[in-house]
Image (spheres, rainbow, N blue to C red):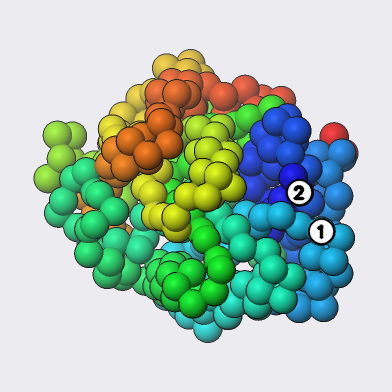
């Protein structure tokens, strides 16, 4: 089986690519490297540097024979999406349609899509199930929801089946792949930059939330657990399963202060912390119910203890202190 991994040079996509390869599935990676790293794609995989919105490039890739698509490609900075919604609707939504049209032209009918908890928007419900109302509060979440809606209608009209996986927060490292976004906005890599002396302090955005320690609670899943869910979703669709939407979380939230304390335990370093102002639209608690995927595909998060995720990310950081800068391919 040959799978096209669009956005496969990014953090999550490159871990999925590795795990597919390890399981004997041939992965072809298409990525424009806008935020990904060529070095994170295994050398054994065919890599095409190209844009998901380039129909001609997609035709050339599909002509070689593709059985299924995994679609990770997106911009994903919430704040930037509010400043520049056009960039998000173009890249995340309009270019996804170019990809879906290429799939139609080449009779490729199986798709796994990276969606997000941001499709739910503000919530007082915890844990969040897939039936929760969908009211994104920013263009990033709205652009992902627009793709979900397009997939729903495509699946009704054409021979097209998809699994939309709504991730909460990916964390950890796998093999030689770790989290290296620029700018970095994710809590765990920022905490590790502070531990490594690459940042002076960590800012906690509000400590008066209605949570036990006053800081926001989020749901973290090990990136290798996410990858495992992709492989299970692919098998499910290939075995004839219907289109489906799944949350991917670990069902347990951790507060910002808990993440800081765990980072201090794992690294043995004290983190200087500053309390900053609350960010608008930051809900107190965002925790997923993943019961549906557990029931349907027997998926559970195996590696997603906070210590394990931070420990793996810290080991990766110590091996590659500057992330992908100055590294060769591997
Ligand atoms: N990291 C998380 O915690 C998280 C949470 C929820 C959802 N997601 C979603 O999961 C996906 C992967 O996230 P990530 O953290 O690995 O992000 P990432 O930025 O590391 O990876 C995205 C990849 O897509 C590529 N890309 C972007 N636009 C492209 C285009 N038009 N054509 C070709 N390639 C393109 C980038 O170069 C990058 O390699 C994204 O869609 C993101 O929105 C991530």
From mark 2 to mark 1, how far is it between C-alphas? 7 Å
Q: Quadrant of the N terminus?
A: top right
Query: Which structural element holds mark 1?
Result: loop
Residue 289, can we see it?
Answer: yes
Task: Identify the disc placed on residue 2.
Answer: 2
The residue shown at (56%, 68%) is 159
Of pointers 2 and 1, the one earlier in the residue sequence: 2
The residue shown at (52%, 61%) is 161
The residue carrying pointer 2 sits among few (fewer than 14), some (14 to 19) or many (20 or more) residues within 10 Å by Cα, namely some
Q: Which quarter of the figure has residue 325?
A: top right
Asked whether disc 2 touches disc 1, contact meaning CB atoms under 8 Å apart, the reply is yes
Residue 29 at what x, y percent from top left? 76, 53
Could you say which is closer to the camera, residue 74 or residue 60?
60
Q: Is residue 135 above or below residue 272?
A: below
Q: Quadrant of ligand 1?
A: bottom right
Residue 106 at what x, y percent from top left? 74, 70
Q: Is residue 215 left or right of residue 81?
A: left
Circle 1 sits on which residue?
Answer: 65
The residue shown at (85%, 66%) is 63
Residue at mark 1: C-beta within 8 A of ligand 1: no
Could you say which is closer to the camera, residue 248 or residue 1?
1
């Amino acid at each position: 089986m040959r799978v096209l991994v669009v956005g496969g040079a990014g953090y999550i996509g490159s871990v999925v690519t590795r795990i597919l390869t390890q399981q004997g599935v041939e992965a072809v990676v298409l990525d424009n490297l806008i935020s990904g790293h060529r070095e994170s794609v295994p050398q054994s995989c065919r890599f095409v540097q190209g844009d998901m919105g380039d129909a001609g490039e997609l035709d050339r890739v599909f002509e070689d024979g593709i059985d299924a698509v995994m679609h990770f490609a997106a911009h994903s900075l919430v704040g930037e999406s509010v400043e520049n919604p056009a960039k998000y609707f173009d890249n995340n939504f309009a270019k996804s349609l170019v990809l879906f049209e290429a799939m139609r032209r080449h009779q490729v009918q199986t798709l796994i899509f990276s969606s997000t908890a941001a499709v739910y928007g503000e919530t007082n419900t915890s844990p969040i199930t897939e039936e929760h109302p969908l009211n994104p509060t920013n263009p990033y979440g709205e652009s992902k929801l627009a793709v979900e809606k397009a997939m729903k209608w495509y699946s009704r009209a054409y021979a097209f089946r998809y699994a939309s996986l709504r991730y909460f927060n990916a964390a950890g490292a796998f093999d030689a792949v770790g989290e290296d976004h620029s700018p970095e906005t994710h809590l765990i890599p920022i905490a590790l930059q502070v531990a490594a002396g690459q940042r002076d302090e960590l800012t906690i955005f509000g400590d008066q939330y209605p949570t036990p320690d006053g800081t926001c609670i989020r749901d973290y899943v090990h990136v290798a657990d996410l990858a495992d869910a992709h492989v299970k979703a692919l098998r499910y669709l290939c075995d004839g399963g219907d289109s489906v939407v799944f949350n991917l979380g670990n069902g347990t939230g951790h507060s910002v202060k808990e993440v800081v304390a765990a980072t201090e335990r794992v690294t043995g370093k004290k983190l200087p912390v500053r309390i900053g102002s609350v960010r608008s639209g930051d809900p107190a608690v965002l925790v997923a119910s993943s019961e549906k995927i557990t029931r349907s595909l027997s998926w559970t998060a195996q590696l997603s203890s906070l210590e394990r995720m931070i420990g793996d990310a810290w080991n990766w950081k110590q091996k590659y202190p500057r992330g992908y800068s100055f590294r060769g391919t591997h």
